[in-house]
Amino acid sequence: MESTSDIVRIKIALDAVKPAVMRRIEVPVSVKLDTLHEIIQAIMPWGNYHLYQFHVRERRWGIPMPDVDIYPIADARKTTLARALSEPGFKALHYTYDFGDDWRHTIKVERRFAAELWDAFPRLVAAKGRCPPEDIGGPWGYAEYLEAMSDPHHPRHAESMKWLGRRDPNEIGIAAMEAALGRFVKRATLPTRRAAKRMA
């Protein structure tokens, strides 16, 4: 049985993008899905300008908007990661950011473990690939930008360079990601130092 101090290591892969973009983090299973959304925004990093949604099979979580939702959606602010992972038939948690560019991510659980005393989470474990820019047109638009940027004879080379300049798709800033995670870090939900001494 999972407790509030249980931790999961998850691999977050951005679908349909080359070079590959991946982040591996450790988070408490008790984290709310709206907070997990903000954590993903911080480590990609995305700009958090657009709507988002998580889903497992047919079950969906986001920010409900009854007037426009075309299918049932549960409130991500009231749902924990543990709840999503417990969905029948769970294999992966899917996360979509920006329904225009349609950035789709696949989130897989790699490990579950109990937190050690004084551990702090969330924690960045590994990262690969630079996140595409916002509003570039999704995976297709990003692929076109990379092609145009790398070819001086491409008809959109000058336009792409003027708009975004030259970006190395493999260059990532680990220190910036870890700093961005800082505002989410909490100590594991374990006994305080004083309580630990009483139990010794």
Image (cartoon, helix red, strand yellow):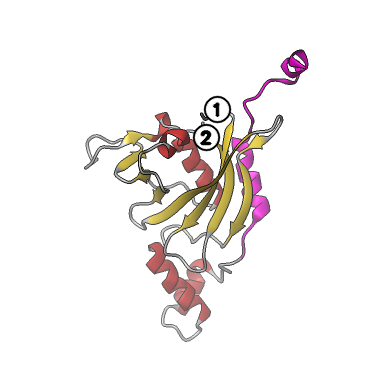
Residue wearing tag 2: 29
Tell me: residue 110, above or below residue 183. Answer: below
Residue 181, disc: none
Residue at x 65%, y 24% (from the top left corner): 190
Magenta stretch secondary structure, dominant: helix
Q: What x and y, as percent, mark residue 153?
A: 47, 86
Q: Nearer the viewer, residue 22 or 145?
A: 22
Mark 2 crowd level (few <14, some 14–19, many ≥20, 10 Å Cα)? many
Mark 1 crowd level (few <14, some 14–19, many ≥20, 10 Å Cα)? some
Q: What x and y, as percent, mark residue 140?
A: 38, 68
Left or right: residue 123 compared with residue 18: right
Q: What range is drawn magenta here?
A: 171-200
Instruction: Give yes or no for residue 79 being in the magenta stretch.
Output: no
Q: Are marks 2 and 1 in contact (CB under 8 Å)?
A: yes
Q: Type of residue at label 1?
A: Thr
Q: Type of residue at label 2?
A: Val
How many labels, in total? 2
On the image, which quarter does residue 80 sit in? top left
Residue at x 52%, y 68% (from the top left corner): 19
- Label 1 secondary element: loop
Quadrant showing the C terminus = top right
Residue wearing tag 1: 4
Q: What x and y, as percent, mark residue 25?
A: 58, 47
Residue lying furthest bottom in this view? 153
Q: Nearer the viewer, residue 56 or 163?
A: 56
Q: CA distance from mark 2 to mark 1?
A: 7 Å
Left or right: residue 157 compared with residue 69: right
Q: Nearer the viewer, residue 99 or 115?
A: 115
